[in-house]
Each structure stands twice: as C-alpha cells, then as structure tokens.
Amino acid sequence: MPPTPQQDRSRETRRKLLDAAIATLSEHGAAATTVSAVATRAGMSRGAAQRHFHTRDVLIEETVTEFYSRLTRHLRQAVTDLGVSPGVSPGAATTTRVVELVVDSFSSDPFRAALHVWSAAAGAESGLRELIVSADARYAREVLQLMALALDADLTDPSTRELLRMTVDLARGLGLGAVLIDNADHRDKVVARWATMLDQGLRHNS
Amino acid sequence: MPPTPQQDRSRETRRKLLDAAIATLSEHGAAATTVSAVATRAGMSRGAAQRHFHTRDVLIEETVTEFYSRLTRHLRQAVTDLGVSPGVSPGAATTTRVVELVVDSFSSDPFRAALHVWSAAAGAESGLRELIVSADARYAREVLQLMALALDADLTDPSTRELLRMTVDLARGLGLGAVLIDNADHRDKVVARWATMLDQGLRHNS
C-alpha cells in the first residue's frame, strides 16, 4: 500500500527535524542540541518535535544513526556513479576521485557532528559511547569495502588492506584538521599526492 | 634568588591540579571538568584549587595552554635525544622513530583533552575556540619544524613540506581513530609503512 498523505507528512517532518539536529550538532555541539533548539531550527513547535523524539537522548541517538546512514548512502551512490566494472583496473583519475570522496566524507557536517557526540558521550553514563563507536567502526568498514570495489582492490591482501585503511586514517586526520583550521587548499594537494602514492602501492600489490 | 619553600609548594600544587585537569578532560570531557572535580581528583579541597584557578573557564584555558606546552617540551626533548647532526641525512630507522613520535603525540591524553575542549568551545560564546584553534595551529607548526630538524629536511621545499604535513594529518587521523577504537596494532603497521613512504619521498626531493 502506498503511504497515506498523513504518513508522508510525518516522514517529511521527521526528516526536517533530523536535518536541523545534524546542523545544530555540527555547529554548536551536543550540549546545545536539545529537542527545543532543534524544533526551533526546523520551524516547528517543541510539542510537534516531541511527537517524533520523546527525549533529548532519543533525538541524539537517532541523529547518530541517521547521519551515518546518510554518509553510507552518499558514498555508495558516488561509487556507483563512478561506473567501475568488476575485474577492470581503474586508472589514476579514478583513484584520485575515490580518495577525494573518502576525504570529503570525513570533512562533512556529519563527521563534525559525530565528533561532538563522541565528546558528549565521554562525560555521560549512557549507551551513547557504544553507539557512536560501533556506528563509526561500521562506517569505516563500509568505506574500505566501497574503496575496494571502486579500485578493484583485494581486501584479503594485507598490504592492500593497509593502504586503504591508511586512506581512511589520512581522511580522518584531514577532517579533524578542517574542523580546527580551514585547510581546503592543503587538503586538495594531499588528495592528489596520496592518490599517486596509493595508485603506485596498489599496482605494486596486484 | 631561589624559590622559597612556599613558592615551591604552590608550584607543586598547581602542577598536581593541572595533571588532574588533563586527566579529567581527557577521560570525561569538558562538561565534567569543574574546579571541584579536579580538586577532588588531585586530593585537595575546592578552596585550595580555587586559589590557583578562580573559575572553571580559567582552569580550562590554563589547562589548554599547559597541555600544548607539555606536548611541545616532550617532542623537543625526544628530537634532541635522537642526536641528529645538522647536514647529515638520517637513516630509515630515524625516519621511523620520528613518525612514531609524531603519531604518539597525537594519540596522547592531551590530544584527547584537546578534542573535548574543541567540542565544548563550539557550544559556548567564549574565547575558548580561538584559544584551542591557535594553540593547535602553533603545535602543528612546531611539529613540522621538529620533524624537519630531525630528518634534515628543507621546509622551504613545497614537496617536502607537504610530505611532513601529511605525516601530521595521518597522525591526527590515527589519534582520532584511537579515541574511537583501540587500533594500536594497526597504528604500528601504519607507522612502519608511512615511514618507508616518507623516507623515499624525502630522498627523492633532496
């Protein structure tokens, strides 16, 4: 059965609230991310927001799940758009594009939001820490698999796996650098240089 | 004039409080780092702690300055201990040791504490954000200079500078990975592999 207009509206409201929650978390941190603040940002009443998220804890937890799932969907789509064929080694341009996608993913608002949630989780007795750590680990695994797919790389080869994990490490570091200082110019240079190193390393392994 | 016994005691008290503040920040985040909590951890009364740090803001600010200065002193000493001579190209073992030192620096308690302060600063209207951003940028510059010194590398060469900055990016990413998941085994492998890549890159540049 297709959704009723009411279900559509409810889904739309929920999406708007999650958008507002990600933006608030990313810009102002976890302490500032209350149901009221998010409702205001989404242009609705606190009561309307509470029908979707009963408490602040629920709001933060569902926001974490949501932003990792957005990151995953976005990266999956981007890799699909690269149009790589299985068994065909991609060229250097594809390697650069893949490194760029991974670096962008770890420089995005959801990444910044994740950092704030991690920090807030350290001070609280809650399942939040476990949630963010496991969501992050799952996302890192997903990134590895998508890179392997896009670069026709063999994840069971230890040296290849290590190079791909280093790409994630470097991307995380650049992402963290970006939250502290604006390093866009430096980031572009690193993407280009690391892509060359990665390309050479992967060719050497295969 | 040598310090009086009273000055010595005061300095020692201050050091203990800063130790406790770094540990509390690193483990529980900024919200948990109050003058009372830090005093309790250091085994003294709130009043005694307040003679050194009048408010929580002052405590956090001075802790930020202190942990970056500890990181700097520690790295300077470690580079001095390497005993490199100017004009002499170091071997691959020195490159590995230098990468290890940089990675360790960004996986330490002060780095974790810095992340929490950054997160707390995003939600507050304070000079804290500016303080942490400028302290972090200063430290990153210091790390570059110390690496250049230890590796007899020329920072005015753009390619060399980029390789050294990539080392900092990678170290930051590994440090962040370490706060989320325990990745010590992976970290050791990355240190070894990156040291080889860096060594080759620097030889190629010089």
Image: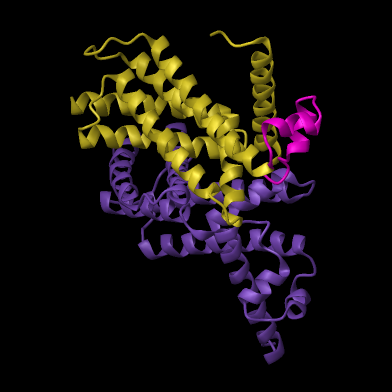
Chain colours: A yellow, B purple
Q: Quadrant of residue A157?
A: top left
Residue farthest front in this picture: A1
State whether residue A107 appears in this view.
no
Is A111 included in the stretch rendered in magenta? no
Q: Residue at x 65, y 37 (%)?
A: A59
Q: Residue at x 53, y 24 (%)?
A: A70
A39 displayed left or right of B25: right
Q: How many marks?
A: 0
Q: Quadrant of the C terminus of chain B?
A: top left
Near-viewer residue (B180 or A48): A48
Residue farthest left in this picture: A206
Q: Position of residue B134 (x, y in %)?
A: 66, 47
Is A35 included in the stretch rendered in magenta? yes
Near-viewer residue (B27 or B128): B27
Q: Quadrant of the N terminus of chain B?
A: bottom right
Above or below, A103 relative to A76: below
Above or below, B126 relative to B75: above
Q: Position of residue A77 (x, y in %)?
A: 45, 15
Q: Which residues are magenta?
A: A29-55
Q: Residue at x 68, y 42 (%)?
A: A56
Q: Position of residue B72 (x, y in %)?
A: 54, 59
Q: Position of residue A121 (x, y in %)?
A: 58, 50
State whether residue B106 appears in this view.
yes
Above or below, B55 relative to A143: below
Q: Residue at x 46, y 39 (%)?
A: A136
Near-viewer residue (B171 or A30): A30
Q: Quadrant of residue B16?
A: bottom right
A107 displayed left or right of B200: right
Q: Quadrant of residue A10?
A: top right
Above or below, B173 relative to B63: above
